Amino acid sequence: MKKKLINSTRMPVYRDAGFELTNADITGQAFKKETDNDHWPEHFIYSRYRNPTVIEAEEVLMKFEESRWALLTQSGMSAIDTALSVFQEAGDSRPWLFFSEIYGGTISYIDSVLKNRRGINLHRFYPEGMRYDLDKFKEKMEDLKPSLVFFEIVSNPMLIIAPAREIVDIIHSYDSIAIIDNTFASPYLLKPLGLGADIVIHSATKYLGGHGNITAGALCGNDQQIMKKAIEYRKYVGHMISPDDAYRLNTQMQSFFLRFRRQCDNAVTVAAELEKSELIEKVYYPGLVSHCTHSIAKEIFKKKGYGAIVTFSFKGKENKHKRQRRDEFIRAISDHIKLVPTLGDSNTILMPVEPIWGDRYPDPGMIRLSLGIEDTDEILSVIKSSLAGII
């Protein structure tokens, strides 16, 4: 039962490892009811199980995603582990299907942990160029009949937009579970549970936190049985976020919609400007008509925006020249835009693609730009001046 202890507008930070249970009868009741895994328990027991500060932040995210429940974890990867692990059953050899265009850390996790350590029967679905072919996806589903399918609304770093509603409908037509990573699109652009997704995942480190000073993850859903299993798994493996981080995340989420709207506006302006440059070979941004999945983005995002990431590549007679231009640009802009291996920060940051993704995206001239909330004219001025000095 939720209790307001003081006349504060914010839930305080409960750093308690264990909570007072008063007497033996209440202790027995608390532990007996703990197996029910209610989201807000009548009696808190231990902060690895549930914590009031954490639940308060989870309820904010529930409003964002319009979900019946949300669970916070200490990182995006722990959220992914929780979401996937609740569907792993001993003796169940049915395959799991993952779209190929997903976060590199997720790819490493499914290969190293799910496949090599847990023996999950894994398969991948690849796009045709820069689009997902739904007919081929149906063929893949018919061939495999997987129990679970995992995909991202916006791929990283090529920003391929998935036709989410159609994909989820196909997944459910085979009685499979649909798990969607919504980090790049965020609840501002799309709420996948409304399309029928079973679980939605976020790296809350990115746009929900938005200040580059916290790591957190989240999973949201509507099915209460899935929630109970997820609470149990999070409790036993220790994926609970700390109350301090939950408190900070809660305060940062208050400005989420303002921040992300501004970041989307900056991204579409920067993408259009980069596309004009004679130094740039290609700009990948779903808000541009030139992007292969622009029409899909326009339909599913309802013109609210197209995300805050812009990927672009420098021209060059050969790879050596492309790499040289990339490095010159990074040096020229470094006083204003830093190279930081993350995204979603309120400051604009960048990352070269080839050194991170290697053979997957070997173009040495490619850069992923994560737009912040700075003044648009200031960002454009910095980019233009940095491009001007490149040979």
Image (cartoon, rainbow, N blue to C red):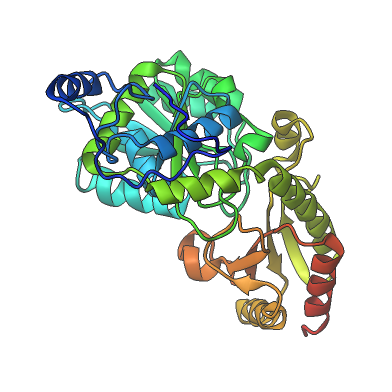
x, y percent for residue 148: 37, 27
Residue nearer the viewer, 8 or 153: 8
Q: On the image, which quarter does residue 230 sit in?
A: top left
Q: In this view, does 33 lie above or below 191?
A: above
* 304 to the left or right of 60: right
Q: Quadrant of the C terminus?
A: bottom right
Residue visible at 42% across and 16% down in the picture: 174
Residue visible at 43% across and 33% down in the picture: 55
Residue nearer the viewer, 221 or 238: 238
* 160 to the left or right of 197: right
* 368 to the left or right of 26: right
x, y percent for residue 212: 55, 60
Q: In this view, does 261 lie above or below 140?
A: below
- Tell me if I can see residue 101 in this picture: no
- Tell me if I can see residue 152 in this picture: yes
Q: On the image, which quarter does residue 186 sit in?
A: top right
x, y percent for residue 192: 57, 28
Residue visible at 50% across and 41% down in the picture: 202
Residue nearer the viewer, 340 or 289: 340
Q: Is residue 343 above or below residue 216?
A: below
x, y percent for residue 54: 42, 39
* 75 to the left or right of 188: left
Residue visible at 79% across and 34% down in the picture: 303
